[in-house]
Image: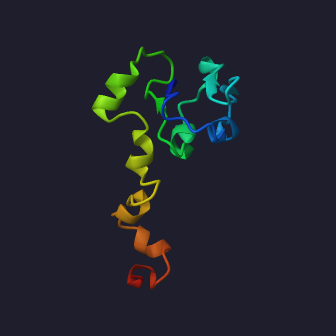
Amino acid sequence: MIEWVSADRCVQCGICVKVCPTHVFDLGPDDTPVIARQEDCQTCYICEAYCPADALYVAPYADEKVKVEEQELIASGILGSWRKTIGWGPGRTKLAAMDQTPFIDRILPANFNDKP
């Protein structure tokens, strides 16, 4: 579930508030999102994926809260790492581009892999 919003990294864009399917966030007085309904988090990672500043951390545990420290998240490279994992953001390789699933060639256009 959602565990952390980094006030230092957040750019107050409000995207996480808009994309959350269960309305976990509220905007704080300075437009920094606040985790208002953590128990409603579905651990879908949508907020972390859409955060352009890599300012969110969603723990993989859907039913239990995890105590986290921002400096530990930063040191371990976990804070905002879901975007990197799926290849979202400038200069990152998209997860779909790395797909080696055998059936993928059956559903892609014939000349898909010929593009530069």
Find residue 14 and report its horizontal and vertical position in percent.
66, 38
Residue 61 higher or lower than 92, as above or below:
above
Question: How many discs mark residues in the rendered view?
Answer: 0
- The quarter in which the C terminus is drawn is bottom left
Q: Nearer the viewer, residue 53 or 115?
A: 53
**Corner quadrant of residue 35:** top right
Looking at the image, which residue is at 29% across and 30% down? 75
Farthest residue, direction left: 76
Find residue 9 and report its horizontal and vertical position in percent.
49, 35
Q: Nearer the viewer, residue 25 or 100?
A: 25
In this picture, residue 74 sits left or right of residue 61: left
Looking at the image, which residue is at 39% across and 61% down? 91
Find residue 81 and report its horizontal and vertical position in percent.
39, 40
Looking at the image, which residue is at 51% across and 39% down? 48
Residue 104 higher or lower than 31, as above or below:
below
Find residue 90 and report its horizontal and vertical position in percent.
44, 58
The figure's colour scheme reads rainbow
Looking at the image, which residue is at 64% across and 42% down? 15
In this picture, residue 31 sits left or right of residue 76: right
**Corner quadrant of residue 73:** top left
Residue 115 higher or lower than 23, as above or below:
below
Residue 57 higher or lower than 97, as above or below:
above
Q: Nearer the viewer, residue 41 or 57?
A: 57
